[in-house]
Image (spheres, rainbow, N blue to C red):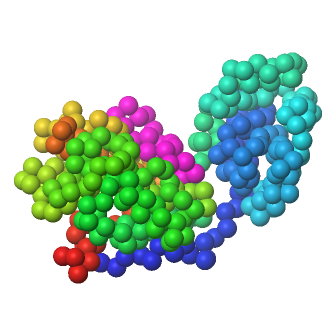
Amino acid sequence: MTVPTGVVPATLAPLIVSGRDDRVRAALSTHGAEALVVSSLTNVRWLTGFTGSAGRAVVLPDEVVLITDGRYGDQAADQLTTAGAAARVVVGRSAGAQDQLLVDLVRDVGVVGLEAAHVSWADQRRYAQLVPGVELVPTAGVVEGERVVKDPAEVARIEAAAAIASAALAAVYDQLFGEPSERAFALALDTEMRRLGADGPSFDTIVASGPNSALPHHRPGARRIVAGDLVVLDFGALVDGYHSDMTRTAVVGDPTDEQAELLAVVTEAQALGVAAVRAGVAAAEVDLACRERIEAAGWGDQFTHGTGHGVGLLIHEAPWLNAASTEVLAEGSVVTVEPGVYRVPSGGARVEDSVLVTAEGCRPLTPTPKDLSCLRSPRTT
């Protein structure tokens, strides 16, 4: 096997956000609003390129304005220019000054949308008092819906993050056989991802060994990993704001017959799910493809979560691949396929890839093989 170097390519194309505001306006029109106050910092970043911790973007009929505080004025101006955002920056040095800037922007707009998922009841009441002559309407998923389909620069960052995660696992994998604690192995994996160029892990790395492998989101603890353990490794890297996500299940030593069957069923179910991914396919069909294989093995009630989710600026975002989903997969979206079986107390297994949805099917972005034995160093086998 050729393991990717994991170094972030110096040739990553810049992230350009121009045109995204027009897409948001078109989506906003279905809500009957003329403007939108974007409160989610993730949505602000996607729309403008701004990465600070304080800011609201106001999408008006003819412009986008980013409101931030005195810490971020210069940074915001530079980032918006670099990202090609058709937006201007205004700075309020206090919360009250920022609210007044918002009032000045929307006081002559008839109907203003608020992001219902990101505005508290208290904030809504405050906005209503600030602009009593403006009708405020809730919106849902206006920006999130536009974020589902990734452009090539976004895909490149997710793929670079996945390459780093894969290379990091290859570099530290042998440590798994030296009886490390779960916490120590997680730290080694996180450190290696940073060394290879990641900004950090995508999320709190999961290392779940032995009986803990039956807990889907176990937090690494002091338990030592020993011969005979199944070990669920769920992790990813972060590159320029974009996440990767991958799960592999290792066996320390030779698997028992039960462990071998469990790994085979979960791996087959995951392959069936990946094969079902295609633009225009219902997300629920991908879930069904995985679930039917596991149910046929008699473990349907031990597959206790959905099959997958979107990946991008958030580790969990639309679309959602589960039995209740009404979403249809779109070409250019990145989703995970991650069935698992969790058998208390004997242990569990999960296999996950992130894949790019295409018109013909999908392209896996996570290169680590399902059989991890090829990652062992010759001197340790």
264 to 12, vertically: above or below:
above
Q: Horizontal and vertical percent for residue 225?
A: 25, 56
Q: Which image quadrant for residue 197? A: bottom right
| Residue 121 visible from this viewpoint | yes
Q: In the depicted view, which residue is nearer to us: 52 or 36?
A: 52
Q: Horizontal and vertical percent for residue 267?
A: 23, 55
Query: In this picture, which residue range is highlighted in magenta?
Result: 309-327
Residue at 82% x, 61% y: name it. Answer: 78
Give yes or no for residue 320 being in the magenta stretch. Answer: yes
Residue at 37% x, 48% y: name it. Answer: 220
Residue at 12% x, 58% y: name it. Answer: 255
Give yes or no for residue 278 being in the magenta stretch. Answer: no
Q: In the depicted view, which residue is nearer to us: 173 or 62?
A: 173
Q: Horizontal and vertical percent for residue 289?
A: 26, 45
Q: Quadrant of the C terminus?
A: bottom left
Q: In the depicted view, which residue is nearer to us: 71 or 220?
A: 220
Q: Quadrant of the N terminus?
A: bottom left
Residue at 29% x, 70% y: name it. Answer: 174
Question: From the viewer's perspective, is 354 left or right of 115?
Answer: left
